[in-house]
Amino acid sequence: MKNVRLFKLTASMALAATMGACTNSSSPEDDFFEFTSSSKGDSSSSSVDVSACKTVKESLATPTKFNVANDSDTSWTFSWEYTRNSDRPETGFRIEYLDLDATNTDWKSEGTTNAEVTLYKLHGKSKVGKYYRVVAIDDCGKSDGSNRLQINENGSTSVSTATDADLGVPTNFAITDTLGENLWLVSWTYSGDKDSYVLQRFIESKNAWEKFLTIDDRTALETVIDTAAAGKYIRVAAVYEGKVSTYSDKIKMPDAVVKSTSTGTTSTASKSSCKPAAPTALAVTRIAPSVWQLGWTYKESSNCAETGFIVQSLDIDADDNPTWKDVAKTAEDVINYKLKGDKFREKFYRVAALNGDKKSDWTDQIKVSSHISYESAYNFTKPEISARVYSAPDGYEMQLTVTTDTPNKNVLNSGDTKAVDFAFQLAYGTGDVKDTIIDAYQESSVVMKFKSVEALCNSYGRVKVIWTDNYGSSDETDWSVRKGTRTAYSSGLTDMEGLCPYVYKDESSSSSAE
C-alpha cells in the first residue's frame, strides 16, 4: 500500500488526488494527511475507488516459508507458501528487494506474479548482495512481508527466519554536543534488535532522503556529524537482518561555517587539476590486543588517478574543541593502514584519496574500540584442556594439557606479538588455589603433584591464554572448562577410575563445582 502524503493541497494536487494519482514525496514537513491507492509492481492504477479501499477491514494474509534454490551462480528460484484470507484474496504477489548500499534504503519491487503463483525466477549477477522478501498484493495494498533471504556476493544464499515484525523506532534523536567547527555529536535511544544503524539526509534539490552514513557498531547510540549533513535535516533508523526500522523524528543540523581563504600565502603542495574519486567501504579488523587494521575499497576514476590516501582521526573526548587530525598518508594503491597502540583506541577514523593538492570526499567514519572482534585468522578464543592422572614414585600426579590450537600460529608468529602465555589455575583437594604461568611458545601442559590419594581425588584445573603485544597492551581469553578428579569435572579423565574409585560409589553425594 503506497502512503501518499499531501503537504499543501493546491488545486492541481486536489485534482490529482481525485484521480487516484500517487506521489512519493519525502518532504520533511511535519503536517500531512494520508490516503491509500492501488499499488501492484511499480505502477499505480487510476481506476481504484479510494473510498472503497478505506472500508476494507480484513488484512491480506502474509506469505510464509519464503525460500530459495540455487539454479546456477546467476540464477535462483524463489518459492513460498500462502494460505488465503477468504475475505480478502490476493490478486498476486510482489518480490521486493533491499540494497543496503544504495543511497535510498527502501524496499523496491523486483517483479510480480499472478494470484496463486508462488514461484519466481531471479536472474543476473546484479541481483547478488541484496535482501529479498515477498508480499501479497491486491488493488488496495499489500500484506506484511515474509521472512527475508539474501543472495550473497558469491552467489550462495542465506535464509532468515526473521519477519517484518516492528523493530521499534529510534527515539530522542538530538544534537547533544558541539565538538568544534562543523563538528556535532548526535545521539539517540533504541532498545530493539539491530545489526547496524543508517542515517539519512534530506536533499531539497531532489526532494528525497538519501543515505549518508552507516554505523556498523551495534552498541553505538551516538555518532559524529560533519559538513556532509550541515544545514540539512537528518534522521536515523536501525537495521536488523535486512530490515530497516521506522526512521526517527528528523532534526535540522546547523549550517556549515565557511572558512575564508587567504590570498597572501601559496601552497607548497603539488598542483593538480582534478578531484579523485572517494574511497568506499571503510572497515576495521583487530589483529592484536592494541593493533587494528583499517582497510577500504577504491575504484579509480577513468579521468583522475589518485596519488595516495590520507587517514584522519577524531577524538571526541580529547578536549572541548576536537578536530579531525591527520594520522598518516599511504602511497598509491595502498588501501590499508595499521594502527598500533592504545593511543588509537576509542577514536573515529575516515579516509580520503589524494591527487596532488586535491582531495576526494571522505569515507563514512568508523570507530576503533576494544569490542571489535579479532580477524578470523587470529582465532583468539578460549582453549580446551584434557586431564590425566597416574601414580608417581613419591605420590600421585595429574597432568593438564591444552588440546586445541589456541593460540594459533598466526598469533604466535605475529610481528606485533611480544609474548603469549598459558595461565593455569589449579585447585587442590584442600581447597587451595594456585596460579601458574607458562610460556605458550615452549609448553602446553602442567603437572599437579599430590602426596595422598585423597588430595588427588578432589582436584581440578583450568587455563586461559594471555596475549601481550609490542605496544604494552594485553588481552586474555575466557577460562577453559574445568577438568580434573573432582566429580563435576571428571568426564573422560584417563585412569581416574582406578586411582579414585570411591568418587564413583555415590556421585549424588560427591562435591560439586562451587
Image (tube, rainbow, N blue to C red):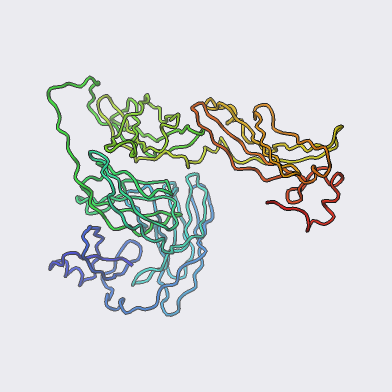
Q: Quadrant of residue 15?
A: bottom left
Which residue shows up at 50% across the image and 41% down it?
373
- Residue 407 vs residue 395: left or right? left
- Residue 464 vs residue 253: left or right? right
| On screen, residue 443 above or below 238 | above
Which residue shows up at 47% across the image and 52% down it?
150
Which residue shows up at 53% across the image and 33% down it?
474
| On screen, residue 462 above or below 342 | below
Q: How many marks?
A: 0
- Closer to the camera, 246 or 226? 226
- Closer to the camera, 286 or 304? 286
Q: Quadrant of residue 364?
A: top left
- Closer to the camera, 125 or 175? 175
Q: Which image quarter holds the N terminus?
A: bottom left
| Residue 78 placement (x, y as % from top left) | 49, 59
| Residue 212 placement (x, y as % from top left) | 31, 46
| On screen, residue 369 above or below 330 | below
| Residue 466 placement (x, y as % from top left) | 59, 34
| Residue 60 placement (x, y as % from top left) | 41, 72
Which residue shows up at 78% across the image and 38% down it?
398
